[in-house]
Image (tube, grey):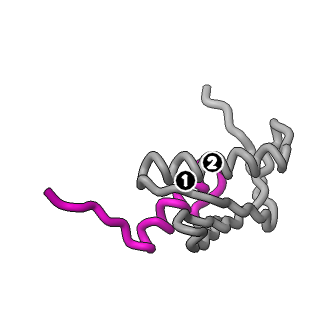
Amino acid sequence: MGTTTFTARALQRLAVGIAHDVARVSARDVGVQLSDDHGALRIAVTVPVAVASTRRTDLVAGGEELRTGLIEGMRELAGREVGTVDVRYSGVHRSTERRVR
């Protein structure tokens, strides 16, 4: 048989990718730190607030969506249990949503 292992760097890159998708910001604007939380992962993520001109921003709901996305994504993609996700907003990312014609 065999085993599948993930390096710490691979787990960090995966968490950045998940946060990038959920928060709708550039991956280079996402900061992630992983640590042990009694056998589970603890994720500290820093992202800018993504503000689109056509929709309102609810930071509390956005933070909860990011937490849920990281917990479920790390479980589904890497088989890792996430015990805690700390979200910190840093800066603002303004975008304009474009219509496709």
Between 22 and 77, the residue placed more toward the observer is 77
Callout 2 amino acid: Val
Where 55 sits versus 66, above or below? above
Q: Which SS class for mark 2?
A: helix
- Residue at x-position 82% and y-position 37%: 55
Instruction: Indicate the quadrant containing the C terminus: top left, top right, bottom left or bottom right.
Output: top right
Q: Percent position (x, y) of residue 45?
A: 67, 65
Asked if residue 31 lies in the magenta stretch, the reply is no
Occupied quadrant, residue 89 = bottom right
Along the line of sight, the residue nearer the viewer: 34 or 2: 2
- Which residue is depicted at the point 46% across and 65% down? 11
Return the x and y of residue 17 as percentages of the image width and height: 52, 57
Q: Which residue is mark 2?
A: 22
Disc 2 to disc 1: CB gap under 8 Å: yes
Helix, strand or loop at mark 1: helix
Residue found at x 42% / y 53%: 79
| Residue stretch rendered in magenta on the structure | 1-27
Question: In the image, what residue occupies the spot 80% across and 43% down?
Answer: 61
The question of residue 7 being in magenta is answered with yes
List x then y, in percent, for residue 75: 48, 50
66 horizontally vs 62: left or right: left
Neighbour tally class for label 1: few under 14, some 14-19, many 20 plus, Cα within 10 Å? many
The residue tagged 1 is: 18
x and y percent of residue 83 in the render? Answer: 62, 58
- Name, please, the residue furthest toward the front: 38
Helix, strand or loop for the magenta stretch, by majority? helix
